[in-house]
Image: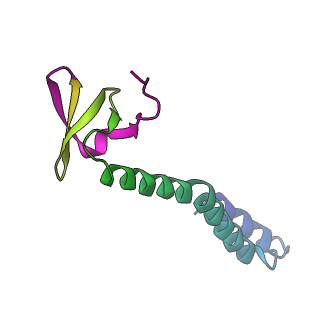
Amino acid sequence: MNILTITLLQAQAGGAQAPAGGSGMFWIMMIMLFVVMWAFMIRPQRKQQKEMEKFRNELKKGDKVVTAGGIYGIVDEIKDRSILIKVDGDVKLRVDKNSIVRDYTEDAPKA
């Protein structure tokens, strides 16, 4: 038993009546809480995940990207789950496709 149940039982035993719309208000508040959480937390996160997946699927050779670890490179080869990025000179790294976090083509200095 929780404290709310004990309090209600004591109030009924003392002759006081329980509020008429108590459980209805509880469910309305719970539904409103879920709607607010969905609107401000879940929905924007899903939208961001869809945008990130679209970005990763549209990568092509020559795109300048940044990994989650902060490594800057140029896409050299794309496979199903991994991407080969050219880091510097002849240095190439194979990274998971999900570790690519952004494109810095427009941020890169023009040489």
* Residue 7, position as x, y percentages in the image: 73, 63
In the displayed structure, 11 sits above or below 91; it is below
Q: Residue at x 70, y 67 (%)?
A: 29
In the displayed structure, 39 sits above or below 17; it is above
The image quadrant that residue 109 belongs to is: top left
The image quadrant that residue 66 belongs to is: top left
* Residue 17, position as x, y percentages in the image: 83, 76
Number of callouts = 0
Q: Nearer the viewer, residue 66 or 12?
A: 66
Q: Residue furthest front?
A: 111
Does 42 sit left or right of 22 as displayed?
left
Q: Was residue 108 drawn as part of the magenta stretch in this picture?
A: yes
In the displayed structure, 89 sits above or below 30; it is above
In the displayed structure, 61 sits above or below 24; it is above
Q: Nearer the viewer, residue 4 or 39?
A: 39
Q: How is the image coloured?
A: rainbow
Q: Residue at x 80, y 74 (%)?
A: 18
Q: Was residue 101 drawn as part of the magenta stretch in this picture?
A: yes
In which quadrant is the C terminus drawn? top left
Q: Residue at x 33, y 53 (%)?
A: 58
The image quadrant that residue 3 belongs to is: bottom right
Does 77 sit left or right of 64 as displayed?
left
Does 8 sit left or right of 90 as displayed?
right
Q: Which stretch is magenta?
A: 88-111
Q: Nearer the viewer, residue 102 or 14?
A: 102
Q: Residue furthest right?
A: 16
Q: Residue at x 57, y 63 (%)?
A: 1
